[in-house]
Image (cartoon, helix red, strand yellow):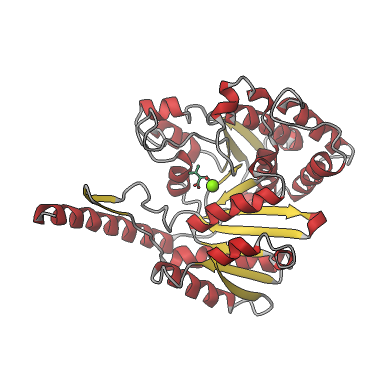
Amino acid sequence: MTEQQIKSALEKFESLIREQDVRSDKIKAQGDFLDFAALPKIIIGVCGGDGIGPVITRESARVLSYMLADDVAAGAVEFRDIEGLTIENRVAQNKAIPDDVLKELKSCHVILKGPTTTPQAGDPWPNIESANVAMRKELDLFANMRPVKVPSESIDWTFFRENTEGAYAVGSKGLNVTDDLAVDFVVTTTEGTRRIARLAYDYARRNGKGRVSVVTKANVIKTTDGKFLRLCKEIGAEYPEITTDEWYIDILTAKLIDEKRRKDFRVFVLPNLYGDIITDEAAEFQGGVGTAGSANIGKRYAMFEAIHGSAPRMVKEGRGQYADPCSMLRASVMLLSHIGRQRQADMLERALDICMYEEKKIAITGRDTGCTCAELGDYVMETVTRFGARN
Ligand code: IPM
Ligand code: MG
């Protein structure tokens, strides 16, 4: 390694540290959560994304507008279509989120977002940052809440994945110091950790869940994970009625498949990358990633999405219209709850449970052996009508 290579690596490292210092100060200066009840009108942005994204997003927006029909008629809710968050446009502009799209996103209060394709090294596209990751950072959506429920097996888990820090904070800005040496960085800030921990414990308190599990690999990743664990436990001490326990990610991954132990878990709080990995595993118990929705929550904005990718193969094989919208419909339940429409959220959730697990009048298989995405949407709305008035 030459002196010049060391110098250049140190300069890049310095600029990363300066950037993260600014971000950390911004978090500290942040106000409280947006009060939806005080807004004259709630604006819901809808962006379809790539692959099966537009199909399942359109369907979920149709169901959401049905659930919110009276609010829309009264001018209390507006849906706004946002174009341009496609891999073609992102590549053409060489931006994870093109500027005009970001401006439109910021003109909304909440966003329903379809999966977007994330380029990786070796793909035909430039290796731009994931649109998901960029949106979480740009809108400071620091909490990724991912529920997984299998009532027949007493599984009732809610994951609070930290969403802007950890291995993702500068995941696209690692250093190739030389041809032989590459370095990535993991970032943990005090306020960044405290705010996700508070959200997890508040949720546990509000919903009568007596247990929060803090998941790290603090025995090895001593500095950042060690800090995360210590701060979560400090916050946990403010909630004496809730039991806090600590798990390392490796053994937790094993315990989630232990039928005797997994029933006991309730709420998890964990750094970004572990949350990413474990929520795919967890979703598998409930029928796969296609069934799981996720809420990306910040103080000012919130974005609701599936936990899976854009499945370009389905579209290539002409099966796009058979894509399963359930993940986005579960995300829509969380959206309704987030904007203070709990009654509609409960109705939609109940209808989804009936359609997906109980009655199952029609089934979606991802191909022409099952129903289409739109037929499933119709079935869900027809099921909702059985509960009476939506407002
Ligand atoms: C998720 C996804 C994203 C992530 C990808 C698409 C960048 O896997 O939302 O879990 O890693 O966060
Ligand atoms: Mg993931």
Residue furthest to the top:
318
The one of 89 and 32 positioned closer to us in this rendering: 89
- Residue 186, above or below 244: above
The one of 33 and 121 positioned closer to us in this rendering: 121
Q: Is residue 321 visible?
A: yes
Quarter location, residue 291: top right
The one of 77 and 307 positioned closer to us in this rendering: 307
Residue 218 is situated, as x and y percent measured from the top left of the image, at 46, 71
- Residue 28, above or below 278: below
Residue furthest to the left:
3
Quarter location, residue 25: bottom left
Q: Residue at x 32, y 61 (%)?
A: 21
Q: How many badges with numbers are in the image?
A: 0
- Residue 215, above or below 88: below
Quarter location, residue 161: bottom right
Residue 374 is situated, as x and y percent measured from the top left of the image, at 73, 26
Q: Residue at x 84, y 42 (%)?
A: 354
Work out which quarter of the rendered image holds the N terminus and state it.
bottom left
The one of 371 and 351 positioned closer to us in this rendering: 371
Q: Is residue 199 visible?
A: no
Residue 310 is situated, as x and y percent measured from the top left of the image, at 55, 33
Left or right: 211, with 14 as reference point: right
Residue 76 is situated, as x and y percent measured from the top left of the image, at 67, 39
Left or right: 209, with 174 as reference point: right
Work out which quarter of the rendered image holds the C terminus and state it.
top right
